[in-house]
Image (cartoon, helix red, strand yellow):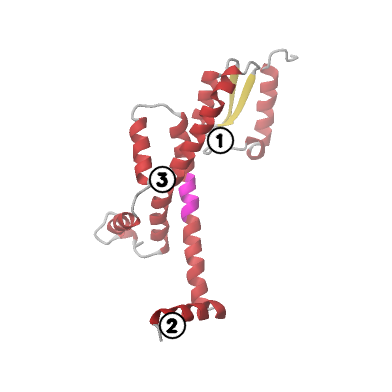
Amino acid sequence: MNPLFDAFAGALGLIASGDRALLQIVLLSLGVSLAAVVLATLIGLPLGAAVAVARFPGRQAVLVVMNALMGLPPVVVGLVVYLLLSRAGPLGSLGLLFTPPAMVFAQTLLIFPIIAALARQAVEDAWVEYEEQLRSLQVPVRLIWGVADQLMPLDYAQRMIAVLPDVALIPIERCGHIPQQEAPERFRTALDQALASAPGATK
């Protein structure tokens, strides 16, 4: 019989029978990929947003590197990870070579440049789209912002302050993207402060 047909038939047989070893392999692959996506998102989203809203020397070079890393060949990443984790490598003492954490590390290196570049483009496009509207806004604005916000860093608020005519920033320390849920009491205090500082507010 055809070896290729035999291989497909054997694979379908394992799937149909619910082979325990196959199930463990599939679950391990899904777990590794999910962990890598989560880690890459935690790194890439704030990095991309920060690069989008911040202006600093060397920003163009950072953009070039971020875009170049999107095309990083998996073989190169695998080789780099192998050299790092092999016995002769700088991280060889950890004994992680050919383990699931090593696979998560390698996949994270592959994914995070893509997430960072996409996040930067999305935030930058939104800023370009709404910048004129923000500049034309004539009503008082009070920004209640979590200082530890990783999705929309504090730099984004600073850029809004630069273009809005009447704006004040009310930061909430040790708080992330959803202060009303993460720190409701401090958010209520900040909201009272915002309302009290608005023009025409009753003292």
Quadrant of res 113: top left
Q: Residue furthest front?
A: 2
Q: Nearer the viewer, mark 2 or mark 3?
A: 2
Q: Which residue is mark 2?
A: 6
Label 1 sits on what residue type?
Answer: Arg
**Rendered residue at 47%/50% (across/down):** 39
Q: Residue furthest left?
A: 88
Q: Which residue is mark 1?
A: 174
Please report whichever mark, 2 or 1, sits nearer to the chain's N-terminal start.
2
Contact, mark 2 vs mark 1 (Cβ under 8 Å): no
136 vs 140, nearest the viewer = 136
Magenta stretch bounds: 36-42
* SS class, disc 2: helix
Residue 158, given in percent of the width and then of the height, sits at 51, 24
Q: In the rendered view, does 65 fall on the left or right side of 31?
A: left
The circle drawn on residue 113 is 3
Q: Residue furthest right?
A: 202
- Magenta highlight on residue 56: no
- Magenta highlight on residue 40: yes
The answer to whether 74 is drawn above or below residue 173 in the figure is below
**Rendered residue at 37%/31% (across/down):** 59
Q: CA distance from mark 2 to mark 3?
A: 40 Å
**Rendered residue at 59%/17% (across/down):** 136
Contact, mark 3 vs mark 1 (Cβ under 8 Å): no
The answer to whether 164 is drawn above or below residue 38 in the figure is above
